[in-house]
Image (cartoon, rainbow, N blue to C red):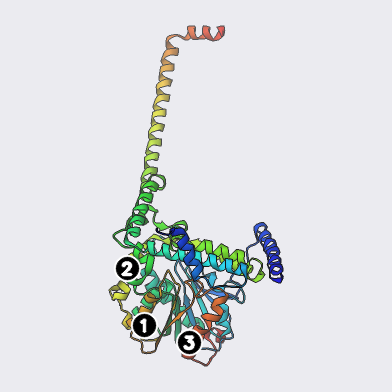
């Protein structure tokens, strides 16, 4: 009887919250961690987040290009990867690639690897006053960062973390299969789409990879609708999940051809800015993190980085979750973030000299 | 006699679903397992060569259907240039018609000034 009473109480709360969700047009406040813009080039921006800074080695976080906005990493207070990292004492920098418009249609992967990433890293070093930097790449940001670290040995990268970033594209799952050159003519697609890949097309691709995801999401929402905390998290995540970002056509062409179709990064055939990009040239400490339920970057395709690099200090972790839940949301706070921050803390310069920017003040 | 595949499917889902004393919880678990089974089945289908081929064909057809509607930047530029030329030709034709009408009217009025004047008055 008490069980039925409890369920009835939950139903009342569900109806109340459902009515509130349906009638409310308030958007949740996302990305609240205090930050300062350090540098901008093209659509890309570099942000520095305030922290007590107990580790001297700053962290440059490189997320995916296009597709979605990076405020997922600073979703809500208490459910923010950036907040976690700053609380752990890391001087944290986020590279926001920006929302692309028609002016960006000629931006290529090569531009990102040979122009944007080197200049952003130099700005991090200058702003922090540090001699070395840790680079943390997520999703598409990880192979791009790997290409940059491999091609620029003169830039002092102390640690490299690949979080859910595909490396061996032969093992890249459904996207790898669908983008097979036998069936997918990337030039024709980009041309027909007018030179860039619109947000709607990207949304369609990501919806197709998990056709039952929305059903699951809304079933879980109904189940947890009585829980205000869950509803708050859902609303925040849902706002992010419905904001897709277009991809520049030239970038998409190079991304699909060089990475998915020809697997050049893993095979060592990539050459950007006149430099050879060979993963064995990466010799810094390396951590690769895969998610067991990741459909976008399956664990095997992430793990491949471990055997490809020249580093002696290297580790692979496979954590529960999917591509997004690995790094976003409250579950990640228990399962993933402490593992990553502990690994980095053990390998970052521990003292803390006064940073360059602070000396100036 | 072969069993009904739908019944078999749900029986399998029920077998796999952990038992909970909470009825609502049991119902939720059943749905979760059902969706999970569908997801795995769909993933298997979508991972086949045939599906990739079908998807490629669908994208091709969609692009072909979109092309006349959206056009690419080159096509749009060409179309704009053609429209501009067409506009120019229309303007020229208009000018010619105007001048032709003016000369015809001039010639006519020179020929029958009285007649026209009478008609106007009558009106």
Residue to which mark 3 is pinned: A343
Residue for point 41% across, 15% down = B107
Count of numbered tags: 3
Element type at mark 1: helix
Q: Earlier in the sequence, mark 3 or mark 2?
A: 2
Front residue (pair A253, A238): A238
Element type at mark 2: helix
**Furthest-front residue in this view:** B1
Q: Chain of mark 3?
A: A
Which quarter of the figure is the C terminus of chain A placed in?
A: bottom right
Residue to which mark 1 is pinned: A306
Crowding near the residue tagged with mark 2, few <14, some 14–19, many ≥20 C-alpha atoms within 10 Å: some
For the residues beneath circles 1 and 2, the answer to whether they share a chain is yes
Q: Chain of mark 2?
A: A
Front residue (pair A270, A236): A236
Element type at mark 3: helix
Distance (Cα) linking label 3 and label 2:
31 Å
Q: Is residue B45 left or right of residue A352?
A: left
Crowding near the residue tagged with mark 1, few <14, some 14–19, many ≥20 C-alpha atoms within 10 Å: many
Residue A258's disc is 2
Where is residue A213? Give x, y as percent: 50, 64
Could you tell me if residue A35 is visible in this image?
A: yes
């Amino acid at each position: 009887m008490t069980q039925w009473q409890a369920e009835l109480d939950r139903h009342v709360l569900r109806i109340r919250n459902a009515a509130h969700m349906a009638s409310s047009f308030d958007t949740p406040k996302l990305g609240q961690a205090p930050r300062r813009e350090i540098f901008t080039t093209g659509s890309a921006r570099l942000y520095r987040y305030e922290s007590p800074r107990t580790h001297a080695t700053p962290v440059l976080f490189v997320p995916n290009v296009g597709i979605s906005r990076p405020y997922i990493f600073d979703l809500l207070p208490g459910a923010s990867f950036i907040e976690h990292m700053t609380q752990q004492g890391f001087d944290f920098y986020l590279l926001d690639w920006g929302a692309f418009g028609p002016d960006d249609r000629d931006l290529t992967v090569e531009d990102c690897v040979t122009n944007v990433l080197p200049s952003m890293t130099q700005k991090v070093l200058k702003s922090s006053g540090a001699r070395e930097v840790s680079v943390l790449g997520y999703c598409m940001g990880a192979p791009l960062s790997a290409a940059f670290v491999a091609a620029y040995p003169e830039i002092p990268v102390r640690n490299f973390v690949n979080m859910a970033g595909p490396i061996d594209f032969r093992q890249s799952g459904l996207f790898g299969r669908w983008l097979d050159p036998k069936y997918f003519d990337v030039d024709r697609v980009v041309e027909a789409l007018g030179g860039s890949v619109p947000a709607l097309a990207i949304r369609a691709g990501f919806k197709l990879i998990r056709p039952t995801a929305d059903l699951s999401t809304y079933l879980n929402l109904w189940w947890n609708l009585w829980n205000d905390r869950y509803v708050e998290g859902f609303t925040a995540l849902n706002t992010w999940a419905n904001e897709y970002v277009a991809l520049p056509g030239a970038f998409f062409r190079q991304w699909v051809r060089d990475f998915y179709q020809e697997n050049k990064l893993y095979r060592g055939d990539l050459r950007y800015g006149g430099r050879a990009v060979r993963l064995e040239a990466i010799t810094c400490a390396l951590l690769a993190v895969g998610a067991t339920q990741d459909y976008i970057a399956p664990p095997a395709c992430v793990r491949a980085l471990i055997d490809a690099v020249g580093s002696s200090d290297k580790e692979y972790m496979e954590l529960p979750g999917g591509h997004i839940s690995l790094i976003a949301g409250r579950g990640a706070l228990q399962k993933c973030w402490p593992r990553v921050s502990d690994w980095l803390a053990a390998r970052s310069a521990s003292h803390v000299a006064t940073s360059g920017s602070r000396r100036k003040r | 006699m072969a069993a009904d595949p739908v019944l078999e499917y749900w029986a399998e889902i029920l077998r796999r679903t952990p038992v909970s004393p909470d009825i609502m919880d049991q119902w939720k678990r059943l749905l979760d397992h059902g969706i999970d089974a569908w997801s795995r089945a769909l993933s298997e289908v979508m991972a086949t060569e045939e599906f990739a081929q079908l998807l490629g064909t669908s994208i091709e057809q969609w692009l072909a259907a979109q092309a006349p509607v959206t056009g690419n930047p080159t096509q749009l530029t060409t179309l704009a240039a053609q429209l501009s030329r067409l506009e120019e030709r229309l303007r020229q034709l208009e000018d010619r018609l105007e001048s032709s009408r003016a000369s015809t009217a001039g010639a006519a009025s020179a020929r029958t000034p009285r007649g026209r004047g009478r008609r106007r008055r009558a009106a």
